[in-house]
Image (cartoon, rainbow, N blue to C red):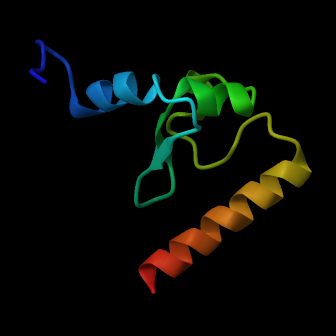
């Protein structure tokens, strides 16, 4: 796939991921969201502009946020061990 002027790798990935029927998100090494597809945002009732750049899950009920953060930390620890 050839990039058009001003298009970044994240733009291309975002466009591809938005066509997937499963939630997809990417975080950087500091656990900030750098990409999330439409399915992910719809599942959690989030807007991309509220999510991208944050390390938290905005507007997520506390009980779901604890489960989400706990599972993310478990994956990060497992992958880095």
Label total for image: 0
The residue sitting at the top extreme is 5
Q: Is residue 45 left or right of residue 79?
A: right
Is the residue 46 above or below the residue 64 in the image? Answer: above
Identify the residue at image location x=80%, y=59%: 67
Residue 45, picture quadrant: top right
Identify the residue at image location x=69%, y=65%: 71
Q: Is residue 17 left or right of residue 45?
A: left
* Quadrant position of the N terminus in the picture: top left
Image position, residue 73 (x, y; %): 62, 69
Q: Is residue 13 left or right of residue 43?
A: left
Image position, residue 9 (x, y; %): 22, 32
Residue 48, picture quadrant: top right
Residue 54, picture quadrant: top right
Q: Nearer the viewer, residue 47 or 19?
A: 19
Is the residue 77 above or below the residue 20 in the image? Answer: below
Identify the residue at image location x=12%, y=20%: 3
Identify the residue at image location x=46%, y=59%: 30
Image position, residue 65 (x, y; %): 79, 51
Is the residue 60 above or below the residue 37 in the image? Answer: below
The residue sitting at the front extreme is 21
Image position, residue 11 (x, y; %): 30, 25
The residue sitting at the bottom extreme is 81
Q: Nearer the viewer, residue 6 or 67?
A: 67
* Quadrant position of the C terminus in the picture: bottom left
């Amino acid at each position: 796939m050839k990039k058009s002027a001003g298009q970044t790798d994240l733009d291309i990935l975002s466009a591809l991921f938005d066509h997937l029927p499963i939630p997809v998100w990417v975080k950087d090494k500091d656990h900030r969201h750098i990409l999330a597809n439409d399915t992910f945002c719809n599942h959690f009732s989030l807007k991309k502009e509220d999510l991208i750049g944050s390390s938290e899950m905005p507007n997520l009920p506390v009980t779901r946020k604890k489960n989400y953060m706990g599972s993310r930390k478990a994956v990060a620890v497992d992958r880095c061990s």
